[in-house]
Image: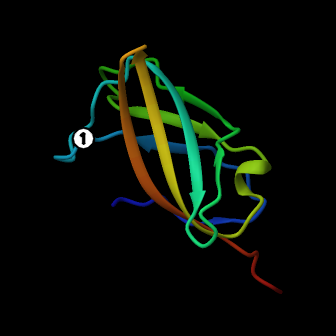
Amino acid sequence: MASLPTRTKGSQLPNMAITWTDDSGNARTLTGVITGNMTNISTAATRAITGTLTKDADQVTNKGVFAWALTAADVATTGQWVLYFIETVSAKNYNTLTLDWSIGDAPTP
């Protein structure tokens, strides 16, 4: 499973730029609405991603690219996470992207 770079607890900026790929690693055109959930690997607690998920408007040049504007809630708890992004194209048609992610403590001076 692919992973996103580790983020420091409480660090909302910069926004994450993520490329949605298929099982072969090819970027796929995004046409639907993107939502997401995150599951803490240690506790199995799952909650909704509260930050804004926005697909790039130019899916020809930036195929598969979407941005995640993190909120404080998204980066409030340290640990290992599994992220589940869901693209809903219609009521019966959706796609999923699963990524690993870590939130770590801020380094001590």
Residue extending furthest top? 90
Whole-percent x and y of residue 99? Answer: 43, 54
Q: How many marks?
A: 1
The secondary structure type at the circle numbered 1 is: loop
Where in the figure is residue 75, as x and y percent of width and height? 72, 56
Vertical arrangement, residue 11 with respect to residue 58, above or below? below
What residue is rendered at 45% in x and 43% in y? 18
**What amino acid type is highlighted by mark number 1?**
Asp
Q: Is residue 85 above or below residue 4?
A: above
Residue 11 is situated, as x and y percent measured from the top left of the image, at 74, 58
Between 84 and 65, which is closer to the camera in this rendering? 84
Q: Residue furthest right?
A: 109
Q: For the N terminus, which image quadrant?
A: bottom left
Instruction: Tell which residue pokes out farthest to the bottom in this image.
Output: 109
- Seen at 50% across and 28% down, the residue is 34
Q: With 59 as the anchor, is 17 left or right in this view? A: right
Read off the residue under disc 1. 22
Up-down: is 84 above or below 103? Answer: above
Q: Position of residue 93 (x, y in %)?
A: 34, 19
